[in-house]
Amino acid sequence: MINQDTINKIMDTARIEEVVGDFVALKKRGTSLIGNCPFHNEKTPSFNVSVTKGIYKCFGCGKGGDAVHFIMDHEKYSYPEALKYLAQKYNIEVEETVQSPQNMEAQNARESLYIVSEYAADYFANELWTGNDGRAIGLSYFKERGFREDILKKFQLGYSPDVWDALIQHAVGAGHKEEYLEKTGLAIRNDKGKLYDRFRGRVMFPIHNFTGRVIGFGGRTLKTDKNVPKYVNSPESDIYHKSNVLYGLYHAKKAIRDLDNCYLVEGYADVLAVHQAGIENVVASSGTSLTTEQIRLIGRFTQHVTILYDGDAAGIKASLRGLDMILEEGLNVKVVLFPDGHDPDSYMHHVGSGGFRKYIEENRRDFILYKATILLQEAGTDPIKRAGIIRDIIESIAKIPDDIKAAVFIRECSNLLQVEERILLSELHKMRAAKLKKAAGANPSPQSASFQQHQQARPFDADGPPDNLFENPGPYEEPGPESTGNSDLIQEQEIVRLLLAFGHELVNWDGIDNMYIGSFIIQNLTDVVFEDELCSSIIENYREEIENGHLPVASQFIKSPDRKISELAITLSTSPYILSENWENKHNIYVRDETVNLKATILGGLFHLKKTKIAGILSSIASEIKTEGDPVNLEILMQRFVMMKGVEKEISRHLGITILK
């Protein structure tokens, strides 16, 4: 168990923008940072990070929390695991009461898979550098391929001895269980129940997740036997899902973000070669064909992809398949085609690092020119084939979500294919119409889903909410039961928001001295009953803290161990909307900040809440009047109704609201 002092140190040290920035490309917008949400697929950023509050909030899927919650949500870690990750990131020492592999494995089965995988990676690396066969076979192979030692160590490359159970014997001897060796795919059990190593006699490529932990392996045989598969990869496990992993992304993510471009190659060796050429923003599809999930991973860091595939026919076809999938996700694509017979690995070693970088810069081509050129060469002068190719190219353009980009590519295609632009546009519209019709059949009302998603976002600014506009919201009419309930929740949440945002500020109106706004609000809620369970819990907690002589701060609720309270506090403290500076600077339109007149802001919130509560009481009394048959009781009800109407009128006068008779 981690002691509280260490937890406090971790929480105080962790910077939300640094933690999230390891997984998401963030850009500044107003006082917040924004990016594409890592928890759901989106092309328009709705994921906000508030540096001042130390929290993140997605206004699309609703996820939110602090640095610890982000790691828990993203990596599926437990609370202690997330704390340990942050401690390691910030070099904070965490004292462990239990250290043995056996006991660590007993604590968490999923964590055990990570521990066994990391052990295997260290074992393979040690065999490569110190083992007799590892140095003679594995290390010699890499050096013959021209790879430097620093590259081999950077990617933790290793060698698995050509022995049936070498890894198993060492791992079990170190206290690891056969169960986890089998679950990670490092070991296989045969029909007779005998366990043996999966990666015998292979050079090893460890596969890392976002945070640098080993989750799987790729193993390449050095034998020439055609019956032996050239590459063997780890099977799916609880920690390794190959369609969601890009080889090299852990080492490349910073460079991808900084350079705003990602090079995509086919194999492990290609990644090593491109790194050795001094280009670090490169990834591979980790032993599988490119998947949509992998493209979305890239999209978190950049909207620009450059494909580096083999110059042979198979490589060209692979690049065309992946190209259409990337376009559909809204990314911009360029292609570099290497001379026939070369892949990125072989070409880098053929021309050297400098020549490789120069070739990439000079031969990077836009996808439409690349695809059109390749396919037209195949078609020759055959008019039927050329017509089919034109449709193929238009199909690719139809996948681009951005209409402006699509229009530009249509124009380029018109010049290249010598076909009138209007004809190509007509074909494009037909394809898009067919696509929309198909989508409509699968989902009759996509607009309603989009609207509901938008409705989840609250219109409060991430670091300073917009004005409440209490001056004259318009005539008031008695709400029905449903609207009253909804209004109750909105107004109750608004009071909680005001407490979180301004509770620590001092009251500076009506001659009141030495009172915090939090205390002022709580004192004015003695006659109000909160219906919403979460709002009521926060209000009561706030009241108890004040009675005990402590003034609560927003971070207490944001970091609450109760995830529901934490999520509500984050939602009420953030907003998807940022007021553009152009409103005032360029257009001379001034929007009043609610902090300019805190009296109006706070009293407005309290009066609106009480007006809503009174509207509910009036509605209830009106219903009783309609059904009451006793004249005495009816008179009492009428008196209560008139009295509450008077209270409502007085509150409305403060708010500047006209009540319709």
Image: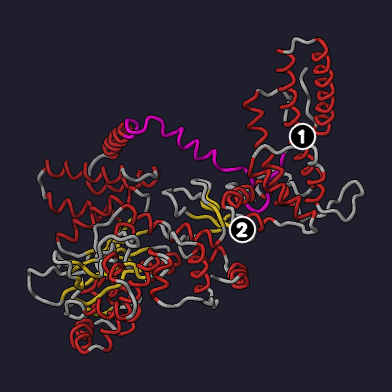
For numbered disc 1, what is the local secondary structure? Answer: helix
Instruction: Residue at 44%, 64% (x, y): give it.
Output: 257
Q: Amino acid at mark 1?
A: Lys
Instruction: State yes or no: residue 293 in magenta.
Output: no
Q: Amino acid at mark 2?
A: Lys
The quadrant of the rendering that contains the C terminus is: top right
Specify the quadrant of the image occupied by residue 647: top right
Disc 1 from disc 2: Cα separation: 29 Å
Q: Residues within 10 Å of mark 2 (few under 14, many from 20)?
A: many
Which numbered marker is on residue 559? 2
Q: Is residue 130 left or right of residue 497?
A: left
For numbered disc 2, what is the local secondary structure? Answer: loop
Q: Residue furthest right?
A: 511
Specify the quadrant of the image occupied by residue 202: bottom left
Q: Is residue 543 left or right of residue 214?
A: right
Can you say whether 384 is above or below 152 in the image? Answer: above
Which residue has dot 1 on it? 610
Can you say whether 613 is above or below 463 in the image? Answer: above
Q: Is residue 246 left or right of residue 601?
A: left
Instruction: State yes or no: residue 449 in magenta.
Output: yes
Instruction: Residue at 80%, 15% (x, y): give it.
Output: 633
- Work out whether residue 407 or residue 130 is closer to the camera in this orientation and state it: 130
The residue segment tinted magenta is 439-468
> First in sequence: mark 1 or mark 2?
2
Q: Position of residue 347 (x, y in %)?
A: 22, 74
